[in-house]
Amino acid sequence: MDLLRRAGRFFDRLTSVMLFLSGVIIIIDVALVAQDVIIRKSFNFTWAPLYEILTYSLVWMSFLGTAAIYRDDGHVKLDSFLQFLPQRARTLVNFVTSCAIVVLCLFLCFLTVRLTVRDYLNHFILASILNPPKWPIEIIIPIALFMLAIQAVRHAVRYYHAFRSPEPAEPGQVLNN
C-alpha cells in the first residue's frame, strides 16, 4: 500500500510539473506574440516561422496540462444532469464514465504511439517553413493520453470505493481524499 501511495505522489508531482511546463509555454508564447506585434508595427517586419512555432507550442501546451486539470476536477462534466440523480447513482455514473475514459484514452494512446513510431521510422518531415520532423511535435499526445488514462483509473477506483461505502460521499469529496 505504501508503494501505491508513493507512486500516487510521484504521479501527482509529475502532472504538476507538466502543468508548470504548460504555463511556461504560455508565458513564452505571450512574450513572442507581443514582441512580434511590436516589431511588426514598428518596423513592418515579422518573422515568418513564428506562427509555426506557436502552433506546435499550442499542441504541447494543451496536452501537457490535461492530466493535471483532470486530476484537479477542472474538466467539463455533466453536473446539470447528475444533480437530479441520487448520490449513489451519481457515484455509479462517475465510476462508469471514468472506466469509459480509461478505455478511450488507452485506445487513443495505442493509435497515437503507433502513428508517432511510424513517423519516426519513416523520418516524416512536415512540409512547412521550418521543415521539422513530425514525431517530436506529436510525441506529447500519447504521453498525455497515457497520463489521462492513469488519472481516470485513479478516479474510477475512488468512485468504486465511494459507491461500495454505506453512504457515498459527494464526488468532490471522493477526489480530495
Image (cartoon, rainbow, N blue to C red):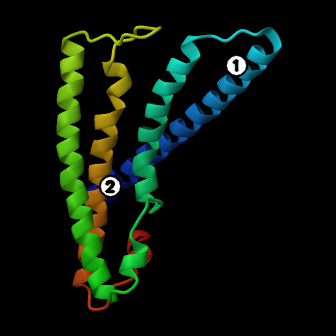
Is residue 2 visible in the rendered image? The answer is: no
Quadrant of the frame with the N terminus:
bottom left
Query: x and y percent of residue 121 in the render?
Result: 19, 13
Instruction: Tell me if residue 51 comes above or below residue 14 in the rendering.
Output: above
When asked about the image quadrant of residue 163, the answer is bottom left
Mark 1 surroundings: few (<14), some (14-19) or many (≥20) residues within 10 A: some
- Residue at 37 percent across and 10 percent down: it is 127
3D distance between C-alphas at marks 2 and 1? 38 Å
Type of residue at label 2? Answer: Gln
Residue kind at label 1, given as amino acid type: Asp
Q: Nearer the viewer, residue 120 or 49?
A: 49
Pick the quarter of the image with the C terminus: bottom left
Q: Report the disc number at residue 36.
A: 1
- The dot on residue 12 is none
> In x, y percent, where is residue 167?
31, 91
- Residue in the picture at 36% in, 20% down: 136
Front position among marks 2 and 1: 1
Residue beneath disc 2:
151
Residue at the (23%, 74%) spot, across then down: 160
Against 175, residue 58 (above or below) is above
What secondary structure is marked by label 2?
helix
Q: Is residue 37 left or right of residue 71?
A: right
Is 83 in front, or is 25? 83
Describe residue 35's horizontal placement relative to residue 68 as left or right: right
